[in-house]
Amino acid sequence: MNNVNQMGSYPRNQFSSYFNPVQGTSAPTNNIIWVQGIEGAKAWQLNPSSMAILLDSETEGKMYIKVSDNIGMSSLRVFNYTEEIISSKVTNDQDLDLSQYVKKEELKELLKEILNEQSISTAASESDKSAESSGTVSAESAAKPKVVYVKK
């Protein structure tokens, strides 16, 4: 028996890896298209209704976006890009400006003072109401401005 089937060709499974060498593993692709300058970007061919991002290999920081419409006419946009370095870790407390912040203890004390003032103003307004109802208003309470607290 030979390896030739009735049609006169070899069985496909023996030679499929020869015709398609990347069949078992796929090669990594990064989808970055490098061109040489703006002339290379202009010469880059696109299918109708498609887009490509082209990076310039000659000028650092230059990028092109080429878009084609449904009949194949393309337009080219030119961009300059720069890298931004993000610092997510603060190394020193000296680098921070803490002058705009309040310490936790100071905040607690301030809240206590505010709550005490509100309770005092509430008690004072109740005594003013009782004095007004009796018809006697003291000079001190008449000169004191009334505090109104509005909740949002």
Image: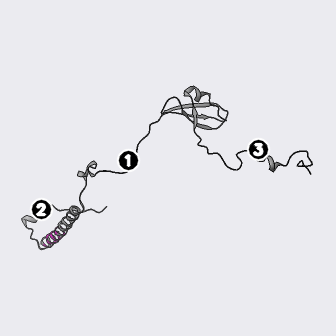
Report the disc number at residue 109.
none
Residue 121 sits inside the magenta stretch: yes
Disc 2 vs disc 3: Cβ atoms closer than 8 Å? no
Which residue lies under the disc numbered 3?
A: 18
Camera-nearest residue between 130 and 29: 29
Q: Is residue 123 above or below residue 79?
A: below
Name the residue at 54% across, 31% down: 57
Residue 111 sits in which quadrant?
bottom left
- Disc 2 crowd, CA 10 A, few/some/many (<14, 14-19, 20+): few
Mark sitting earlier along the chain (3/1): 3
3 or 1: mark nearer the eye: 3
Expressed as whole percent of the image width and height from the top left, the position of residue 122 reads 19, 69
In magenta, the rendered stretch is 120-130
Between discs 2 and 3, the one toward the N terminus: 3
* Residue occupying the point 10% across, 65% down: 141
Q: Which numbered disc, 2 or 3, marks the residue closer to the eye?
A: 3
Q: Which residue is mark 2?
A: 144
Name the residue beneath numbered marker 1.
Answer: 87
The amino acid type, in three-letter code, at marker 1 is: Ser
Q: Residues within 10 Å of mark 3 (few under 14, many from 20)?
A: few
Q: Quadrant of residue 149?
A: bottom left
